[in-house]
Amino acid sequence: MKKIIVTADDYGISREVNEGIEEAVFYSIITGTSILANGILNNLGSLKKSNIAFGVHLNLTLGKPMYSEYPLEYLVNYNFPKFFRKDGRVQYSIKEEIIEREFESQIDKVKSIVNISYLDTHNHIHELSQVFSVVVKLAQKYNLAVRSINEEMTATLRKNGIKCTDRCFLDFYDEGATLDNLLVQLPKIEGNVLELVTHIGYSSSNINDNYNESREKEYNILKSKEAIIFMKKNYKKITYEELF
């Protein structure tokens, strides 16, 4: 039987998303959650005694930076103290040293609340070479696993002694977040250890989140009778901690 990690991204983006993730932990829908260090973490400590793994959702695209010793213009738009969006940052080179300091600040923040076992990134920004280099360095420093989103990344991570899954299923998202896609496409993913990435939660009117309403759709599918039976029949759920 294949093993699978079921991760809920974006813990911290809103209280409503947090509530949905916390509920999914209680009902054993997920086995891990990726945490936005600059988000709302008031209730994160209550999950310490759960059986899930915690990761840091390293972020250069949402909210405000956490590292304050560099001038803000190194990380953010001059006009307001928030991160560049992904498309802007691809054209605007940020030094690896600055990325590293910001990411370390985020890791240290989450580590002060819960034990962490892996790293991933918001908007999959570790596809960018300068970001990936920093993620590799920090994973080695803190002895953490890393989410791999393609075969080349998997090979590089393993070459550097970093734990990761064989494959990552990213297509349960947006228009792909359907029961049929889960039941039909997930079994086609090769590998013995997989990760299913989700973005569940309850919608919120208090945040500017272009995926806001779709979060409940994902969550309703994952907690449906059909999805629960399918997952139990075909996969053994594990956490990132069990990769070590």
Image (cartoon, rainbow, N blue to C red):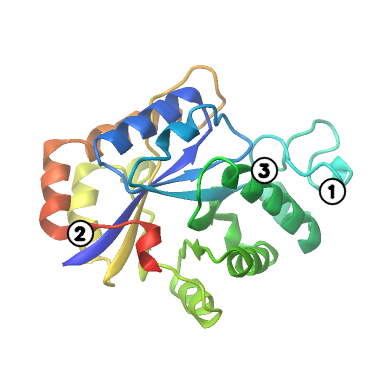
Which residue corresponds to the image point at 80% horizontal and 39% vertical from the top-left? 77
Mark 3 or mark 1, whichever is nearer to me? 1
Q: Earlier in the sequence, mark 2 or mark 3?
A: 3
The disc label shown at residue 193, or none = none
**Is residue 134 found left or right of 227 in the rendered image?**
right
Q: Earlier in the sequence, mark 2 or mark 1?
A: 1
**Is residue 105 found left or right of 20 in the rendered image?**
right
Which residue corresponds to the image point at 49% horizontal and 17% vertical from the top-left? 205
Give the residue type at disc 1.
Answer: Tyr
Mark 2 or mark 3, whichever is nearer to me? 2
Q: Nearer the viewer, residue 111 or 167?
A: 111
With respect to residue 162, does 105 lie above or below?
above
Helix, strand or loop status at disc 2: strand
| Residue at the front extreme of this rendering | 49
Give the residue type at disc 2.
Answer: Lys
Which quadrant of the view contains residue 129?
A: bottom right
Residue 146 position within the rendered picture, expressed as x and y whole percent measured from the top left: 50, 63
Residue 218 position within the rendered picture, expressed as x and y whole percent measured from the top left: 31, 37
The disc label shown at residue 85, or none = 3
Disc 3 crowd, CA 10 A, few/some/many (<14, 14-19, 20+)? some
Helix, strand or loop status at disc 1: helix
Give the residue pinned by disc 2. 236
Give the residue pinned by disc 1. 74
Disc 3 to disc 1, how far (Cα)? Answer: 14 Å
Which residue corresponds to the image point at 32% horizontal and 38% vertical from the top-left? 25
Disc 2 to disc 1, how far (Cα)? Answer: 44 Å
Asked whether the residues under the numbered discs 3 and 1 touch, taking CB atoms below 8 Å apart as contact, a structural biologist would say no
Helix, strand or loop status at disc 3: loop
Q: Nearer the viewer, residue 100 or 116?
A: 116
Asked whether the residues under the numbered discs 2 and 3 touch, taking CB atoms below 8 Å apart as contact, a structural biologist would say no
